[in-house]
Amino acid sequence: MTNEGHAVKSTRRLRLAFLVSCAINLVMAGTFVGALLHGREQHEAPRHHAPEASMLIGGAVFRGLDRPERMALRELARGEYPDILARRRAEAETLLELIRMPTLDAEALRAAIAVQHERLSSIHSAMQDVWIEKVASMSQDERIRLADQVHNHLRHPPRP
């Protein structure tokens, strides 16, 4: 009977181990499937906000500008920095310095954001002026081609 009792205990232990192993496997499989589904939703979501219509059309016009015109606009956007990314980093650092202060000066933070907003707004206005002038100088056929190009871009945006 001792062998029989030992065999029953071993069988119970094996069953218990099997059930625990199945439960762990189900948890792992559920986690994996959940991560896949969640990752797919995140990947399909747009990475950047969609540009406003004037920026979208302006981008199409910008690509059609001569190199010197494009470089002049890039220089305007860059300002005193080596490139646009450096300008954005410097602006972010300005805000982060204010946020890190021992006592937050909300008015100084608002003022710094307003200065950056005004600078960006003036850059956008200048770029819009350039592309509006460019479109105004186009023939109707050229404007139709531009509109079709932007329309196709809206219908079939590039994949992220």
Image (tube, rainbow, N blue to C red):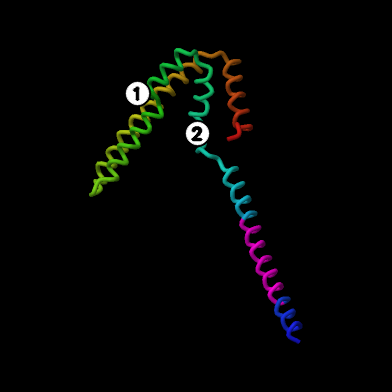
Q: Which residues are drawn in magenta?
A: 12-31
Mark 1 or mark 2: which is in front?
1
How much space separates mark 1 and mark 2, taking CA atoms?
22 Å
Residue lying furthest bottom in this view? 1
Tell me where residue 16 appears, x and y as whole percent. Answer: 68, 73
**Amino acid type of the residue that numbered disc 2 sits on in the rendered structure:** Pro
Say which quadrant the N terminus sits in. bottom right
Which residue lies at the image location 55% right of the left edge and 40% below the top edge? 46
Q: Quadrant of residue 2?
A: bottom right
Q: Nearer the viewer, residue 97 or 4?
A: 4
Neighbour tally class for label 1: few under 14, some 14-19, many 20 plus, Cα within 10 Å: some
* Residue behind mark 2: 51
* Residue behind mark 1: 79
Q: Nearer the viewer, residue 55 or 38?
A: 38
Tell me where residue 130 appears, x and y as whole percent. Answer: 44, 19
The local secondary structure at tag 2 comes to loop
Which residue lies at the image location 32% right of the left edge and 41% below the top edge? 96
Task: Report whether 113 appears left or right of 57.
Answer: left
Q: Does residue 145 sit above or below 52 in this rendering? A: above
Task: Report whether 149 appears left or right of 67.
Answer: right
Which residue lies at the image location 42% right of the left edge and 21% below the top edge? 74
The local secondary structure at tag 1 comes to loop
Residue lying furthest front in this view? 2
